[in-house]
Image (tube, rainbow, N blue to C red):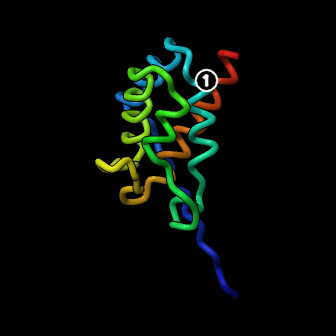
Amino acid sequence: RFWIQTQFISAELTEDQLLLLLESLERKIVSQQLNLVRTHITLGSFQGEADYLKSSNISIMMTQEQDQMLTIALVELSGVQFQEDGSAFPRDQPFEAMAALFVALYALNFLSG
């Protein structure tokens, strides 16, 4: 008999992330952030199988510079490191942190819609 052990790693949002989400809610950009995360960040991205998020994608989806900076800060707090050239890569194992961000954005979008 083989026992398969599954370990679920739960990630919680930090206080800084919660404050940024509150500001996003006030600025009414949660739906844009949700679409960005849904569109550009997948499990395959974290395994190097797909194009990863770029800061230029945020610039395209967010017209206000303050919204762009807010979104970049939120994504960086979720385990993504942006480079000077606009490329990004996951730090450590950020999938859980990005999944937590996705769930929070989804819930806020649903509740505010």
Q: Would you place residue 58 above or below residue 39 in this image?
A: above
Q: Residue at position x 52%, y 66% from top?
A: 47
The front one of 52 and 93 is 52
Identity of the residue drawn at 55% across and 63% down = 7
In percent of width and height, residue 37 lies at 57, 41
Residue lying farthest top? 26
Quarter of the rendering containing residue 16: top left
90 is higher (above) or lower (below) than 66:
below
Kind of residue sitting beneath label 1: Leu
- Residue 20 occupies quadrant: top left
Q: Name the quarter where the C terminus is drawn.
A: top right
* Residue 22 can be seen in this image: yes
Residue at position x 58%, y 47% in the image:
40
Query: Could you tell whether 110 is left or right of 79 in the image?
Result: right
Q: From this view, report whether residue 83 is shown above or below residue 29.
A: below
Query: Toward the viewer: 91 or 16?
Result: 91
The residue sitting at 40% across, 52% down in the picture is: 88
Front residue of 95/47: it is 47
Inspect this view and state whether residue 19 appears. Answer: no
- Residue 54: x %, y % from top left: 46, 47
Q: Quadrant location of the N terminus? A: bottom right
Per the image, label 1 sits on a secondary structure element best described as: helix
How many callouts does the rendering have? Answer: 1
86 and 80: which is toward the camera: 86
Residue holding disc 1 = 108
Q: Position of residue 32 (x, y in %)?
A: 59, 28
Q: Going by the picture, which residue comes out furthest to the bottom? A: 1
Q: Residues within 10 Å of mark 1 (few under 14, many from 20)?
A: some
Residue 59, x across and y down, in percent? 47, 33
